[in-house]
Image: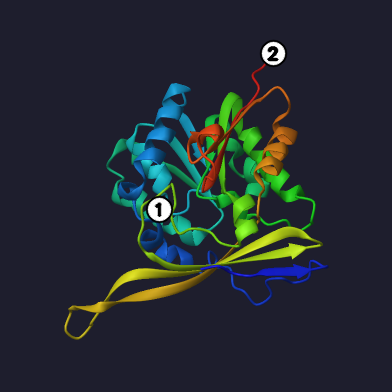
Amino acid sequence: MTGIVFQTNSTGAVVKGVSDQYADGKMAKVYKAFIGDTNLRTENYKNFLIDLLKKKGCRRILDVACGTGIDSVMLLEEGFDVVSTDGSDKMLKYAFETRWARRKEPAFDKWIIREANWLDLYDEIKDLVGEGFDAVICFGSSFAHLLDSQGDQREQKQAIANFEKCLKPGGLLLVDHRNYDQLVDSCNAPKKCVFYDSNSITNITTSVLSVMGKPALVIRDYTVENGENKDVKSGSNSESKSTTELRLMFYPHMMQDFRKMLQEVFGENSKYVTLGDFKNLDEIKNPLFYIHLVEKQRKM
């Protein structure tokens, strides 16, 4: 559903009274209905990620936005060594449950999960970095959850700098965001996602907040089906499905601006590639997502 565009000349308390859906655990409870499990990851996404990591000889992976652990589990099942972090203890609860349930499998027994904030990431996991990870991944448009509270993107640059510090020379950063260029123009985002197959989202309303004429915040209101309601007395499932309403907020990264920010942090000697829905940009007109690949400069 198409939303509206708000215009303001001051930053103000634009989300006053809006609860953090990740902090209260609401999002975590419906995440599996919203995202699904590894079986619902699209083949294009899975093949892209696994093939790229293997082609580049990556072994140790840092998943800095692991959420409930869906991508980390996929990587563990493919034989990678994974360290998983997230800023939400409510989301990590489900990752820990998966680890415990599969603890007899060697890969899962060695799986390290930490709660960590991107702004302090390197300091919080310094003991795990060693000579650096082969790859750092940040998928699911997760990075856009880090808003620009100061108006100069300093915290976003700080987070990327921490990602860079966790990488070994020649290591890969893979980070994505929605096509906010198109979303801001239309104030509408499709329900389709290139990362997962899910029919649980029944409605999305998108609103864009602009400050001094510049897009500063995207607000998305979701209606998500949780599954069938169960009649406690009879033990049977009713035909109706329960729903949960969520409000999530994102910083609208423009593709060229985001690429420039990566270049500022990683420097001119690193290598940069931007894809649209896992394709070269000249092969697709209006991608749903942009995926940025940065290969950290090697030691001279």
Instruction: Say left or right for 160 vs 49.
Output: right
Q: Which of 52 and 286 is in front in this view?
A: 286
Residue located beneath label 2 in the image:
300
> Along the polypeptide, which appears first: circle 1 or circle 2?
1
Numbered tag placed on residue 88 in the rendering: none
Q: Nearer the viewer, residue 293 or 99?
A: 293
Residue at the spot x=34%, y=76% of the render? 242
Where residue 158 appears, as percent x and y from the top left, is 72, 44
Instruction: Say left or right for 254 vs 97.
Output: right
In what element is the residue under mark 1?
helix
Extreme residue toward the bottom, this view: 233
Crowd class of label 1 (few under 14; some 14 to 19; many from 20; radius 10 Å): some
Quarter of image, res 170? top right
Q: Is 17 rendered above or below residue 260? A: below
**Which three-letter amino acid code belongs to the residue tagged 1?**
Phe
**Which three-letter amino acid code belongs to the residue tagged 2?**
Met
Residue at the spot x=40%, y=28% of the render? 51
